[in-house]
Image (cartoon, helix red, strand yellow):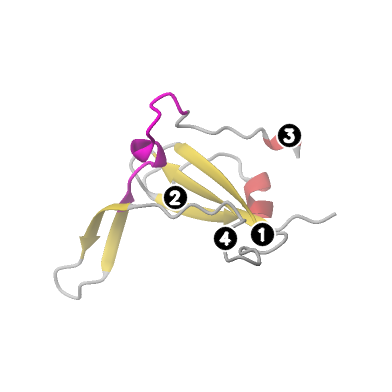
Amino acid sequence: MSYEGYVQLLCGSGHHWSVDCNEYMEMASEKCPICGKQATWINHVDQTNGDIDDEGYNISGHVNLKLKHELRCPTCDSVLEEIYKHPADDSPDPQLPIFTAIDKDDY
């Protein structure tokens, strides 16, 4: 039985990065490659059976994060840094956990 997908991560500073599911299992830590802070949000995206079902609904679990701030180069206008809102900031329920821990030993 195979598993295909990737993991979305977001650090406390709002930096977003993704890693392949196989790479994630080998990672020593979940530290941000930009600032070094610990990931505060982790989302596993399962692409084993595709991303979209027959009715056009996302079945992978991918979360489209909302951009909070973007830093651009004043000379060439290229994006230097993107800061995203934490998904829990938009949650109507303040009791929802802001950190989803997955024990790698369970896989």
The disc at residue 57 is 4
Q: Residue furthest front?
A: 55
The disc at residue 33 is 2
Q: Which residues are magenta?
A: 83-96
Name the amino acid type tagged 4: Tyr
Name the amino acid type tagged 2: Pro
Classify the position of the C terminus by image quarter. Answer: top right
Crowding at dot 3, Cα within 10 Å, few <14 / some 14-19 / many 20+, comes out as few
The disc at residue 47 is 1
Residue on which the image places disc 3 = 105
Name the amino acid type tagged 1: Gln
The disc at residue 69 is none
Judged from the image, the secondary structure of the residue bearing numbered disc 2 is loop
Q: Residue furthest bottom?
A: 76
Does residue 37 appear left or right of residue 75 in this picture?
A: right
Crowding at dot 1, Cα within 10 Å, few <14 / some 14-19 / many 20+, comes out as some
Lower position in the chain sequence, tag 4 or tag 3? 4
Judged from the image, the secondary structure of the residue bearing numbered disc 1 is loop
Lower position in the chain sequence, tag 2 or tag 1? 2
- Residue 48 at x, y = what percent? 72, 59
Distance between the alpha carbons at the discs numbered 3 and 1: 21 Å
